Image: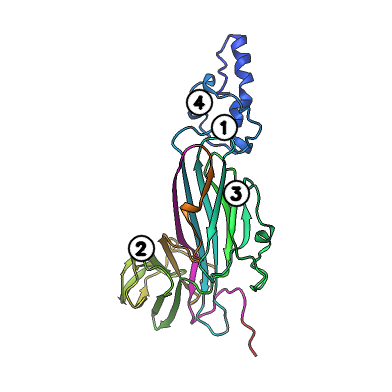
Amino acid sequence: MDYISPSRKNEAEMTAKIGQLRTLLIQACPLGTPLNTNIRSLNGSLDDIQELPTDENQPAWRSNTYKGKPQVNVCITEKVKSKQYDKKDVVDTWQVYGAVNCKCDIEGSAPNVTLTLNLPTNAPPLQDIVVHHCVTSVDPAMLMSSSIEPLDDSVFNGPYKFPFVPPSVSFDLCYYTSQVPVPPIMGCYQLIEEGSQLKITVNLKLHESIKNSFEYCKACIPFFNRGPIAQLEYKVSYGQLDLSREKSLLVWVIGQKFPKSLEVSLTGTVSFGTAGKEHPTDYVCTGNTAYVKLYFRIPDFTLTGCSVDQHSIQIFAPGKPKITTSRELISSDYYIWNSKAPAPMVYKTLLD
């Protein structure tokens, strides 16, 4: 193995190296997870390996003791999924999933940190909370709040306080969901056949409560089980429309902001050439069953309103660390289905 070169002849030296293997493995694979699979980059020589910590209070997940300028980074990432149909007998669905990622470069064998998540007044509570094993204590009622149960006054609504002893590496402190009242972008997609052409209409509206400042925002309109796009006529009220190199996908680049009306629209007609083996196929999107998929990221914003006040983070360790907090909302599986054709759905409303 790489740690002990077979060319070594000195038996005493070989025995010493074998005795250091346990220490190296604990550093390289704390809790069985490799920090770096390139063994040679961990330590140039086994002589440089630090001895096992003698502090009995140091948890197993802090295999290395940090030395340097203290700093703490916290990032809240929320991902929103949605399926929209624009049909009276089908319910649109959306879900938001959050993760709080932390990187704590602070000295000490077992430093204590307390982080509190804040929500705006009257915001829906955080639910389905799962915490990292480094969290030392938590209100049991926080973990009992489930999205399966209906919201009422008995649901835990904070404070969301997490005391923990941070690992040496970046980690997700907790995960959560929330029953937000509206999706960030509502949409309508209509695709119908007119002779040898397809007529498409896409309308998108940004909800007024959403921060109108995107890193990117685009709508992808794929065409499956057809030939290449041979002719395209279109009109967009905002942004620009691009055709993919394969000529089977339209990309509507909305950009970094919606207009003041918060509404954008696309209309057009598409005709196709002869289909070949190289053109995309799909078992769901047959006939006129089709969708628009949205991709966007909004920095410094969360759909739940969840945030971390850097001044409220308590750190019981030597030095005054630099604290950085950020948050973001990212789309994930955000579909708007053609309302003029059948579409896969979760459930229908109960109608008389």
Q: Are the residues at dot 3 and dot 1 in contact (C-beta closer than 8 Å)?
A: no
Residue 49, given in percent of the width and then of the height, sits at 55, 23
Q: Are marks 2 and 3 in contact (CB under 8 Å)?
A: no
Q: Residues within 10 Å of mark 2 (few under 14, many from 20)?
A: few
Q: CA distance from mark 4 to mark 3?
A: 33 Å
**Residue type at tag 2:** Ser
What distance separates the C-alpha of mark 3 from that of mark 1?
27 Å
Please determine whether, in this image, residue 147 is positioned above or below residue 266.
above
Q: Is residue 206 left or right of residue 181?
A: left
At mark 1, the secondary structure is helix
3 vs 273, nearest the viewer: 3
Mark 4 or 2: the one toward you? 4
- For disc 2, the marked residue is 244
The image position of residue 101, as x and y in percent, is 52, 50
Which range of residues does the magenta coloring cover?
319-348
- Few, some or many residues within 10 Å of mark 3 (<14, 14–19, 20+): some
Instruction: Give the residue at mark 4.
Output: 43
The three-letter amino acid code for the residue at tag 3 is Pro
Please identify, in this view, whether the residue under mark 2 or under mark 3 is nearer the observer. Answer: 3
* Contact (Cβ within 8 Å) of mark 4 with mark 2: no
Describe the colour scheme in one phrase: rainbow
Q: Residues within 10 Å of mark 4 (few under 14, many from 20)?
A: some
